[in-house]
Image: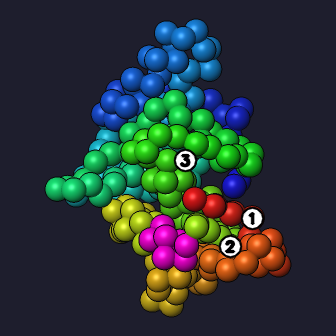
């Protein structure tokens, strides 16, 4: 992932409609944690109060949103991301567990995380990779591994479904994109590709799985 913009001044988007981010901020503040609101950052003050998913955005505003998204993965996850749930859609829901997950992934720090079920562990990682795929890196392979190839394929499907909920004008799509059950790739834009890892059938094969792949992004779910 590109280096974060650590020294660029930003505003704190306390007017966000994503209540989970505000609740996490208040929780960290009550715990006495000083760095408690970096995930509320927004660089372009004119976007405060703007719905990035509105149907009547003009080209200037869309350009500002795109610039903010490229610079600010927290804005993308907080304001842009929508997730499918039974009966409809929901916004990304932040808590201390997936905040730690996202912070470490954005900082290029290898991480092993364990959370209780239904606490958005898998979908939080997917949202990070949706950002990475379109805005965070180029010429990269993302290796999605799992205990079975079918579950690896399921995560590729979840990735594609989540990405399709991003407004079309924010997605870098081409007719030449590779798009199937085990691979998603964009050779004509940023040359990123996602691969579902096969399943090992022996300890020796498990030891070799992933070796030889030049994949800076490896996710074992």
Could you tell me residue 160's position as x and y percent? 43, 70
Q: Secondary structure at mark 3?
A: helix
Q: Are marks 1 and 2 in contact (CB under 8 Å)?
A: yes
Q: Which mark is residue 141?
A: 2
Residue at the spot x=74%, y=49% of the render? 110
- Gap in angstroms between the C-alphas marked 3 and 2: 19 Å
Q: Is residue 150 left or right of residue 109?
A: left
Residue 154 is drawn in which quadrant?
Answer: bottom left
Can residue 21 be seen in this snapshot? Answer: yes
| Disc 2 packing (10 Å; few <14; some 14–19; many ≥20) | many
Q: Secondary structure at mark 1?
A: loop
Q: Which residue is mark 1?
A: 216
Residue at the spot x=81%, y=76% of the render? 204
Q: Which mark is residue 73?
A: 3
Residue at the spot x=48%, y=76% of the render? 150
**Range of residues picked out in magenta:** 148-155
Could you tell me residue 136's position as x and y percent? 62, 58
Q: How many labels, in total?
A: 3
- Gap in angstroms between the C-alphas marked 1 and 3: 18 Å
Residue 196 higher or lower than 166, as above or below? below
In the rendered image, the residue lying farthest to the bottom is: 176
Could you tell me residue 34's position as x and y percent? 62, 14
Which quadrant, please, contains the C terminus? bottom right
| Disc 3 packing (10 Å; few <14; some 14–19; many ≥20) | many
């Amino acid at each position: 992932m590109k280096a974060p913009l650590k020294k660029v001044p930003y505003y704190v988007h306390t007017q966000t409609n994503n209540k989970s981010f505000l609740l996490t901020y208040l929780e960290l503040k009550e715990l006495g944690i000083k760095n408690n609101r970096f995930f509320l950052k927004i660089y372009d003050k004119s976007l405060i109060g703007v719905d990035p998913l509105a149907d009547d955005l003009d080209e200037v505003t869309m350009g500002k949103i795109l610039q903010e998204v490229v610079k600010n993965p927290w804005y993308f996850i907080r304001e842009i991301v929508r997730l499918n749930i039974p009966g409809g859609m929901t916004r990304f829901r932040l808590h201390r567990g997936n905040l730690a997950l996202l912070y470490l992934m954005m900082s290029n720090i290898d991480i092993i995380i364990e959370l209780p079920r239904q606490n958005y562990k898998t979908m939080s990682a997917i949202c990070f990779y949706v950002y990475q795929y379109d805005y965070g890196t180029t010429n990269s392979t993302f290796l999605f591994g799992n205990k079975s190839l079918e579950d690896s394929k399921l995560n590729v499907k979840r990735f594609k479904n989540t990405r399709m909920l991003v407004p079309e004008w924010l997605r870098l799509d081409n007719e030449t994109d590779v798009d199937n059950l085990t691979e998603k790739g964009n050779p004509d834009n940023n040359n990123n590709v996602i691969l579902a890892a096969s399943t090992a059938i022996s300890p020796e094969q498990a030891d070799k799985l992933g070796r030889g792949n030049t994949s800076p992004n490896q996710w074992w779910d």
